[in-house]
Image: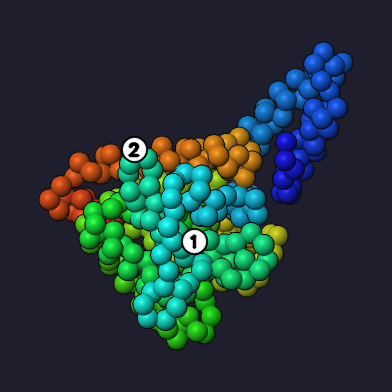
Amino acid sequence: MAKTISLPFENDICEMENLLSNLETRSGKNHPAEEEIRRIRKELVALKRLRYGNLSAWETVMVSRHSDRPQFMDYSRLAFEDFTELHGDRAFGDDRALRCGLVRIGETKLMLMGHQKGKTLAERRECMYGCAHPEGYRKAIRCMKFAEKFKLPVVCLIDTPGAFPGIGSEERGIAQLIADALKEMALLDTPIICVVIGEGGSGGALGIGIGDRIAMLEHSYYSVISPEGCAGILWKTANEETKPKAAEALRLTSKHCMKLRVIDEVLPEPLGGAHRDHKEMAGTMKAFILRSIRELKQLKGGLLVEKRYEKFRRMGEFLETTV
């Protein structure tokens, strides 16, 4: 069993996993410790189920940011076949935070795009920790148009704390490019499936988040702002007291988003989080994408775009009453 980095609320889980790993390494068949191993396994499963079934909003944010959590490039290998990356926006450059490429699942060909945060320090710097620049969204729009021309479904994997907020990004019109991406996705005449695989932060996430089917991994989050940003605005400081309060107030977990009809489905993660079993998580996502494509391909003659429009118009509906 591979060792994972311990989050603050799961120290006891990791200690039990390490103990189990040591016992399994030393024992063989009919070993005296075999009964102890079975007991620890049962206790470990029960503890994970209890702990991960009752995560607070802030604990969910921590899981969504786990360094071992599978990222875009992991899923491009595990859930899809023959990933062929497409580079450049034909105007400025190639953004490494927002990747696009052609893939297939069996005989089904797709356009895949999503945020890549990076694993090593060098890769994270190259990818700006998943914060895309204007050229990233311009590249995404170009690839969406390509997919529409050749009738390819578009799959978007969202994992970003937000678009890059630097001066260069502002100078090159990041707000306008995100707005353009929203407009193009709203009108795109091909199925769009979006999955929040980790962080779904602000306009950076929404820039590739307009879809006919929107899902979130169980322990991901989707929010107009990060908990740290919200805490800084409301309480002028982001510390261990204010960040959990902000996360709870934002209603950013998959359960909240499902209840508020922001998303269509929650994809269950392996017990203990997606970072503990990449292959299982990729398999669950793959099944969701194939099912969604089969359903969406039935919508013909402008009905796809019409239903997408109605879906987003329904978000935020409320009733006013007079007393």
Task: Measuring from the top left, give residue 10's x and y in whole percent.
Answer: 72, 42
In terms of secondary structure, where does tag 1 sit? strand
Kindly identify the amino acid type of the residue bearing the numbered disc 2: Arg
Give the class, few, some or many, for how many residues have Cα within 10 Å of label 2's Cα (few <14, many ≥20).
few
Residue extending farthest to the top is: 30
Q: Which of the two labelled residues, at mark 1 and mark 2, occupies the earlier sequence position?
A: 1
Q: The N terminus is located in which quarter? A: top right
**Residue 235, visible in the rendered structure:** no
* Front in this rendered view, residue 162 or 153: 153
As drawn, the label of residue 291 is 2
Say above or below: 89 vs 121: below
* Front in this rendered view, residue 287 or 203: 287
Say above or below: 209 vs 233: above
Query: Residue at 33% across / 41% down in the picture?
Result: 107
Q: How is the image coloured?
A: rainbow
Q: CA distance from mark 1 to mark 2?
A: 23 Å
**Residue 123, visible in the rendered structure:** yes
Q: Is residue 284 left or right of residue 322?
A: right
Task: Measuring from the top left, give residue 106's x and y in whole percent.
Answer: 37, 40
How many tags in the picture? 2
Query: Residue at 37% across / 66% down in the picture?
Result: 140
Residue extending farthest to the left is: 301
Kindly identify the amino acid type of the residue bearing the numbered disc 1: His
Residue located beneath label 1 in the image: 115
